[in-house]
Image (tube, rainbow, N blue to C red):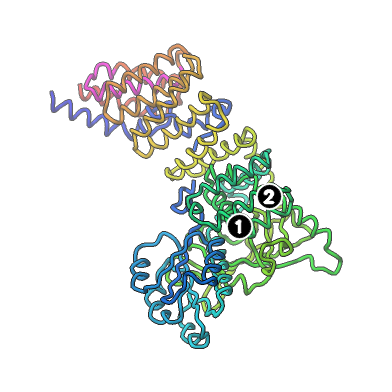
């Protein structure tokens, strides 16, 4: 009998799993799933369950390191001190080496960040060949007194961006390279057509709308941003950035001027870096702290756009062409850049009217075969464009760059993709136009439809949006879990501790862990959900039955059948009080209890509950419903093992 029982248990588990456990309620003993929630009324699930997809660099403010190698560097000289001070305003992490062997040991270890190299002329010929093809080495700058001595040699090394005799020129080029790395980190999303648009594309469009509608207490938010920046670990020991943070606090508070946002953003210091982090990672804390500044930059661009549109005279061209160069992974390019498709740049978009400047930014990491250079050529009709963009040279911190800045999440239509030759290498040239009125109308219609799903106001609405991003990423459990946790963090701020929506959120995080097979973590979140529901809901509420069922399912999967039975029976007890006699949820409970008894070898009891399951299923389901097949199969297996 012992051997037989073991055999039967395995037979039940193996046979029932595909037919029963995977099937959505009412035919399976499964947790409240995302599919279940989609069918539930929104009133009880204001924050619907669910990013980047955490990426490894999301918690990094700047994915960049500067290394300076010079045997004769004088760290006490005013020239050196001023140079380092200038560089630290752009790059947070700087490593200085005098010894080439020490330098080689350092860079031979795996680097998580891209890095730039400033090297003396005396060392360049011996060191550059050894490091040139390292994947994370972005570019090299030779600093020496004899420029002509190395010019011909440098032509053979594409990552060498220049030979400089003045330190100010080195600093300027390093700043430009840092800007290029930041540009490459901007998140781009694309769709092939409006007829095949993905929900995640529309949700990212709504992100900007939600941020712009939040009613910020400006002066209070400035203080919060300043405190947030001071506590960032990459700024704690960066004296220069901390001085800039103090300067920002005084300057922005003194008079909240509409043009100060762009000036501070264009400065490429902590403000620029933290905005990029917030929009790249969708990290809740960063969005909370940087939201008002993102709004201010957008308003500043919009104001300039209106002013500059009024000054266009009859002789001025209405069509302008701007350029943007960057590198992309081949996978991202193929996924997001489609002929006649739409492309959204999910950050403020820096472009130039100078094609040569953009081409210089489109050189990929030579040794990274997964990277390609991309030159975006954007044709803009200023007379019909509704997307705010503006020339910012008059107020930019770097006025000589002739930059045109587009607001965040600007959408373009892909007109043509072609491979061209530039700077001695093949790059992809992508010709874009801003979406036209017809595109805008279709986008607005789609946005209006999805806007109805994103309920609430302000940060509560932001939380709902993050939950919706879960649906767009189901199957990618790590990404789903990231969005769940972000939204829960917002809910904790917006809602009282025992609010029912918090219970829903804990439940949904538990469901993600359940689908990942991490039952202990799933159990913890299901239990937190249940504790809130016990306080927030009446004792006969059906959601309590769901929670007891979900906890029972965890114990069932862990093989703790006695506890699983207790929770399944508690779920059934509430259903008996709360639901009509033939409600489909009873079939789920009877099936679950029958499965536990089967796994425990108590086949008579298992048969009793499986027959109850079958009876309700016959009354409530179509005759060809797959759950009925599972019910007949379960009963047959019980008879076989009896």
Q: Is residue 262 above or below residue 600?
A: below
- Which residue is at the front of the view, 241 or 279? 241
Q: Quadrant of the N terminus?
A: top left
Q: Is residue 315 magenta?
A: no
Seen in the image, is 295 located left or right of residue 109? right
Other residues around mark 2 within 10 Å, as few (<14) / some (14–19) / many (≥20): some
Q: Secondary structure at mark 2?
A: helix
**In this orientation, does residue 356 appear?**
yes
Horizontal side of 464 relative to 433 (left or right) equals left
Q: Badge 1, how many Cα within 10 Å: few under 14, some, many 20+? A: many
Residue closest to the far right: 314
Name the residue beneath numbered marker 2. 252
Q: Which residue is mark 1?
A: 341
Q: Position of residue 507 (x, y in %)?
A: 45, 30
**Magenta residues (range):** 583-607
Q: Locate residue 459: give its quadrant.
A: top right
Cβ–Cβ under 8 Å for marks 1 and 2: no
Q: Quadrant of residue 108?
A: bottom left
Q: Secondary structure at mark 1?
A: loop
What x and y, as percent, mark residue 57? Answer: 46, 54
Measuring from the top left, give residue 452's x and y in whole percent. 64, 35
Residue 496 sits above or below residue 411 on the image: above
Examine the image and state in which quarter residue 33 appears: top left
Give the foreground label among 1 and 2. 2
Question: Toward the viewer: 642 or 523?
Answer: 523
Question: Quarter holding the C terminus?
Answer: top left
Residue at the image point whose x is 58% and y is 42% from the top: 288
């Amino acid at each position: 009998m012992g051997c037989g029982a073991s055999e039967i248990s395995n037979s039940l588990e193996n046979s029932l799993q595909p037919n029963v456990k995977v099937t959505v309620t009412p035919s399976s003993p499964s947790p409240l799933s995302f599919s279940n929630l989609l069918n539930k009324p929104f009133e009880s699930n204001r924050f619907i369950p669910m990013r980047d997809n955490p990426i490894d660099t999301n918690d990094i403010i700047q994915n960049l390191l500067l290394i300076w190698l010079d045997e004769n560097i004088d760290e006490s000289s005013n020239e050196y001190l001023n140079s380092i001070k200038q560089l630290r305003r752009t790059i947070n992490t700087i490593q200085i080496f005098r010894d080439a062997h020490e330098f080689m040991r350092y860079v031979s270890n795996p680097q998580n960040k891209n890095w730039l190299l400033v090297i003396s002329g005396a060392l360049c010929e011996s060191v550059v060949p050894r490091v040139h093809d390292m994947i994370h080495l972005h570019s090299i700058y030779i600093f020496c007194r004899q420029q002509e001595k190395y010019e011909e040699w440098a032509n053979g090394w594409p990552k060498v961006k220049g030979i400089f005799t003045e330190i100010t020129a080195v600093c300027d080029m390093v700043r430009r390279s840092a800007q290029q790395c930041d540009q490459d980190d901007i998140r781009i999303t694309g769709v092939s057509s409006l007829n095949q648009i993905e929900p995640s594309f529309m949700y990212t469009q709504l992100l900007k709308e939600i941020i712009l509608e939040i009613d910020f207490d400006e002066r209070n938010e400035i203080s919060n941003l300043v405190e947030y920046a001071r506590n960032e670990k990459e700024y704690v020991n960066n004296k220069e950035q901390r001085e800039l943070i103090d300067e920002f606090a005084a300057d922005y508070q003194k008079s909240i001027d509409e043009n100060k946002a762009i000036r501070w953003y264009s400065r490429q210091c902590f403000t620029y870096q933290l905005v990029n982090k917030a929009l790249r990672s969708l990290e809740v804390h960063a969005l909370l702290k940087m939201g008002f500044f993102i709004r201010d930059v957008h308003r500043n661009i919009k104001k300039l756009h209106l002013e500059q549109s009024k000054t266009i005279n009859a002789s001025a061209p209405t069509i302008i062409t701007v350029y943007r160069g960057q590198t992309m992974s081949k996978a991202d390019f193929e996924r997001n850049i489609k002929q006649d498709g739409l492309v959204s740049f999910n950050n403020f978009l820096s472009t130039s009217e100078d094609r040569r400047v953009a081409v210089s930014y489109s050189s990929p990491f030579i040794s990274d075969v997964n990277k390609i250079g991309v030159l975006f050529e954007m044709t803009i009709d200023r007379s019909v464009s509704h997307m705010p963009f503006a020339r910012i040279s008059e107020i930019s911190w770097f006025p000589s760059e002739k930059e045109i800045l587009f607001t965040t999440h600007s959408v373009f239509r892909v007109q043509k993709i072609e491979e061209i030759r530039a700077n001695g290498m093949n790059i992809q040239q992508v010709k874009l136009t801003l979406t036209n009125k017809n595109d805008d109308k279709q986008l607005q219609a789609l946005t209006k439809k999805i806007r109805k799903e994103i309920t609430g106001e302000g940060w509560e609405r932001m939380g709902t949006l993050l939950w919706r991003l879960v649906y767009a990423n189901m199957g990618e459990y790590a990404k789903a879990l990231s969005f769940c946790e972000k939204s829960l963090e917002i809910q904790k701020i917006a809602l009282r501790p025992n609010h029912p929506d918090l219970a829903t959120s804990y439940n949904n995080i538990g469901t993600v862990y359940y689908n990942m097979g991490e039952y202990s973590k799933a159990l913890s979140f299901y239990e937190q959900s249940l504790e809130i529901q016990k306080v927030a809901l009446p004792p006969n509420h059906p959601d309590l039955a769901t929670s007891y069922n979900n906890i029972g399912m965890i114990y069932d999967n862990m093989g703790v059948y006695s506890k699983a039975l207790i929770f399944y029976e508690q779920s059934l007890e509430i259903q008996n009080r709360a639901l009509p006699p033939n409600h489909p949820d009873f079939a789920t409970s009877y099936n679950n209890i029958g499965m536990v008894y089967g796994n425990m070898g108590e086949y008579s009891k298992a048969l009793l509950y499986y027959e109850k399951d079958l009876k309700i299923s016959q009354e409530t389901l179509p005759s060809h419903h797959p759950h009925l097949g599972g019910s007949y199969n379960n009963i047959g297996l019980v008879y076989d093992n009896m």
